[in-house]
Amino acid sequence: MATCNNNITHRNSQDKPELRLAALLTWNGDLELSKIVGAIPVGVADIEKLQLLSQFRINVKYYNTYCLAKEGLVAIANVKATFNPHVFIGPDCSVVCQPGAILAGSWNIPMISYACSADDLSRQSVYPTFARTVGTTHILSTLFPFLFQHYQWKAVTIMASTQEIWQYQATNIKKLIEKQNGTVYEQSFVPGYHGDGPRVQTKNILISHRDKVSSE
């Protein structure tokens, strides 16, 4: 588990109870954390400015799940043991959200994801404390045929992780585009935030498919 000790702590008074937020992110070791924390510091600053939680001092810690099920689950378990958060922000990958949200539910801790789109996560009976700010996989897949039609594309390449959720998404998108008589090329890749610093795998896929699509 990779942990960043860059805490965002707002102390209006040391006497106030602490509100602990565990941000579950995905980043490559070559990236600076400041480049991927996104809107979290902005959100915390707004909460403080608007005095929405003025009775608390907010403490945020960042944790890397690597977008991998095993590593993510280990990270979440360790977060609970070492930080005992009041809420999880994230994760950003469904393969981590699904087992992680079951754990969070068993602990009665809210988990709010900004990216997990697996349809299964809508089952409140299984994931009672899970919420998200994005649509489901099914809803998101319906967007692509409209883009295809709007830009009058004739061919596209779908790059999808070998993780089950993204293979399912890619299949849905392919079927919808082929209904519009579009040509679909597919390329799977193994998700790798370990040792793939410059994202060579992704670059090679883009280069190999660039000429195929542009020639259509």
Image (cartoon, rainbow, N blue to C red):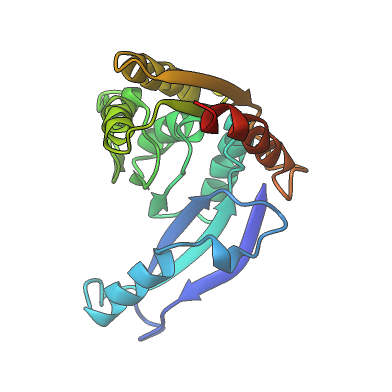
State which quadrant residue 74 falls in.
Answer: top right
Q: Is residue 30 above or below residue 90?
A: below
User: Which residue is painted at 43% across and 29% down in the image?
Assistant: 98
Q: Compare residues 34 and 200 and report the one nearer the observer.
A: 200
Q: Compare residues 162 and 49 and report the one nearer the observer.
A: 162
Q: Is residue 123 above or below residue 38?
A: above
Residue lying at the far right of the rendered structure: 195
State which quadrant residue 70 falls in.
Answer: top right
Residue 42, horizontal then vertical, whole percent:
37, 71
Residue 212, horizontal then vertical, whole percent:
58, 27
User: Which residue is painted at 67% across and 51% down in the image?
Assistant: 28
State which quadrant residue 49 falls in.
Answer: bottom left
Residue 149, horizontal then vertical, whole percent:
28, 31
User: Which residue is painted at 53% across and 56% down in the image?
Assistant: 83
Horizontally, is 210 left or right of 18 in the view? right
Q: Is residue 82 visible?
A: no
Residue lying at the far bottom of the rendered structure: 12
